[in-house]
Amino acid sequence: MKKVYGFLKSQKTGIIVGFTVTGLLIIGSLIMNYVPKPYEGLSGEDITFFFKNPRPIHTWFYIMFVAFAMYGICIFFCTLDSILRKVKARTSKIPLYGASIVHIGFLITLVAHLIGGIWSESGMPITIADKWVQAGEYELKVTGLETTSYPNGMPRKITAQIAIRKDGKETSATLGYNNPVLLDYGTKEFLLRNYGNINAVVLNIGGRTRAFNIKDVFEVNGSKVLLANLYLPPQFPLPVIQLVSEGKDGKYNKTYVRIGRQNAQNIKGVNVIFEDIKSTPAVVVTPKENPSIPLTLIAIVCFGSGMLLVIFRTAYKMVRV
């Protein structure tokens, strides 16, 4: 057992395994770059893809997975040995534990990546505008959207103000590229995928004015009517909407309504007027569940505090000299 323990806590073992992992990462990157077809469907941190789709071409990953596990075991025993030696020597100077704290942070990072790779999930994209949209136990809506562009027209910075509601309590957050909305201590994320404006159609139905989005369904005299499409110039001289209503014998009736009160159309005995087009800022987000985020934050604290202790110890030695 002593030989096994000595092998696992050896720095040489850690260095060899570390270089092995690095080499396998390089090999895997090259394989995925030049043979991308077997990796269709792989996204983010998901490592279950390799176990759900076992193939010989994934051999590099299986070896790397074992190597990472070995690397984590080596770090654990190396750190444990270092702390035990300091405790036995009755070392009371906290800066001397800086390197060990950094190693603990790295070990937590490995565990966080493992948890995230197995249990993280990404949902279908959600479009959020100025109306509340349900996303799990939360409701979200856009309250503001600011964009800046480079001289060539490319987007430079996108900042969306998001209102968030849960159990009647409302909060706000800022969404942007590389700035996701984090909820539930970071385990739930909303990542910005796209942004722009949604054209809402303002209809007057029987004297009542309402705004609808394309593909919305509303009722007219007990019959369902679909707002199927919006046609803008130059397709037509004026904006035109297409309404699809239920007909007889399972058939559907298509009605085209031009903008303007003078162009009202009678649908199911009710006058429908296409009054206006309302442009609303909107964003498309991808919801993601990642239970490893709290561990990642702990790892960051360990790295930061450990490095500060190491720097303090080094600076103290330089001053003493």
Image (cartoon, rainbow, N blue to C red):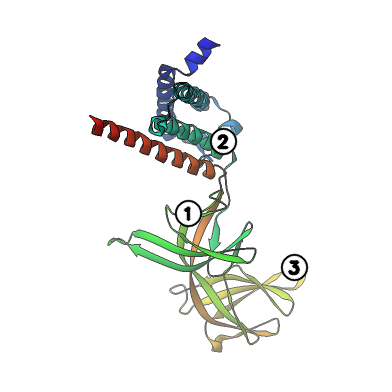
- Which label is found at residue 180? 1
Using a 10 Å C-alpha cutoff, classify the residue at mark 2 as few (fewer than 14 neighbours), some (14 to 19) or many (20 or more).
some
**Pointer 2 residue:** 49
Disc 2 residue type?
A: Phe
Horizontal relation, residue 11 to residue 312: left or right: right
Circle 3 packing at 10 Å, graded few (<14), some (14-19), many (20+), is few
- Front residue of 144/308: it is 308
Q: Is residue 169 above or below residue 43?
A: below
Count of numbered labels shown in the rendering: 3
Whether residue 193 is visible to the viewer of this picture, yes or no, is yes
Q: Nearer the viewer, residue 176 or 284?
A: 176
In the shown orientation, is residue 11 left or right of residue 114? left
**Which is more N-terminal, label 2 or label 1?**
2
Distance (Cα) linking label 1 and label 2: 25 Å
Judge from the rendering whether residue 219 lies leftward or rightward of residue 34; answer left or right.
right
Q: CA distance from mark 3 to mark 2?
A: 44 Å
Amino acid type, label 3? Gly
Q: Nearer the viewer, mark 1 or mark 2?
A: 1
The residue identified by callout 3 is 250
Which residue occupies the foreground of this view, 30 or 136? Answer: 136
